[in-house]
Structures are given as structure tokens and as C-alpha cells.
Image (spheres, rainbow, N blue to C red):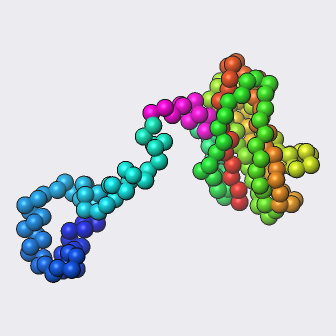
Amino acid sequence: MFDCCKACALAGRIGNARISAESVKKVNEKFRVNPFAKVPLCTPFLLAAIVVLPPAIFASGVDPTTVYARAWAVLAAEPYVEQGFQVREAYWPGDLASGKRKAIRQQLFKGNEYWFWLGTEVDHAKVSVHIYNSDGKLAEQPDSWAKEHMAAAHIIPKTTGTYFIIVSVEESPAARTNWALAYGFR
């Protein structure tokens, strides 16, 4: 663990003033600090963490259904990660009624290979994901698949350009079905 007080003593300075290691030791003995708290208290780390961290971390209104839907999408991605695909942290969340779909526009690059994974937390929901090129033609590979809670579409773009990922809830026992779409590339 990094101890900034010891680092100051080793350097023999605090600011521009030279101090002895013995003086630092006396100060440390007088003001004992829990060793787990030394780094945050000795550096501006704690203040920066409080100011810089996004408010979403502290928000209590996180929708658990979106979290579960994303978990299913990431679960669908797991075997592909073992094949070398890198899953992006960014994802698209949403909710749709049964029989509805949503188009997501995404720039894809020739020379890369992509998988898009769709997940939902709703039991017995049938979801699908398909990829179309800018001309509206189906562009995905034939190994795309769908099963309960998950669906996936695979593409190796022939050209760099805008593609449309179509997310759909084909059937669902819920009035609105939450979903999350993740993607990876290699």
C-alpha cells in the first residue's frame, strides 16, 4: 500500500521545507490513522472521487429490469469473449410492447467482425435481433440465433458504413418487455 507520509519522509521534504524522518515518525505516532484510510486521506483522491464520480452511481432509481436484461445480453456474449471478441461497455436499453421493434443505427467497419447480443429478463418472451445495411438488405451471417431470454446477430461488414440493428419483441407475457443490446468486435 502506498503511504504518502512515508514517501514524504523518504524524499526528506514536504513542500519546500526539509524535514527529518524522525519528525514525520512523531507526527504519524501522534495522529494514528487507520492504514486502510491513509491513501484517501493523504491525497486528494477522496475529494476527487466524490466530485468526479457520475451521479448515476449514487442514484437509487436504477431500474433492476434493465440490469437483468443487460445481464442476459452479457451472458449471451460469454462464449464469444472466449473466442476473442471484446464486449463494449456501452449498451442500448429499452422496452417494447409485444410485436414491436426498434431500429438502432450503428457505424460498422470493414475488416472487423461483430456480434450483437440482445437480452431480456422476461420469462417466456421471444426476442430477436437482425442487422440490415443502409440499402435495407439483411446483412447478418447465417449463424445468428435466438432462444429464451436472448438473441444474437453476427456480421462481417463488406463495406464500412451505417448499419441498422433491429431489436424486436416478437411475443411476451408482459405488457412491456425490457431489453438490453450489447455488442462486441474483433
Q: Which residue does the image show at 45% across and 37% down from the upper left? A: 59
The number of discs equals 0
Q: Is residue 186 above or below residue 128?
A: below
Quick check: 142 left or right of 50? right
Q: Which residue does the image show at 24% across and 73% down from the upper left? A: 7
Instruction: Residue 67: say if magenta.
Output: yes
Q: Is residue 10 visible?
A: no
Q: Is residue 103 visible?
A: yes
Q: Position of residue 127 (x, y in %)?
A: 75, 31
The image quarter containing residue 18 is bottom left
| Foreground residue among 114 and 17 | 17
Image quarter in which the N terminus is found? bottom left
Q: Which residue does the image show at 70% across and 35% down from the upper left? A: 150
Q: Is residue 18 above or below residue 142?
A: below
Quick check: 128 left or right of 139? left
The magenta segment is: 60-70
Instruction: Residue 44: say if magenta.
Output: no
Q: Is residue 83 above or below residue 146?
A: below
| Foreground residue among 156 and 107 | 107
Q: Position of residue 88 (x, y in %)?
A: 63, 52
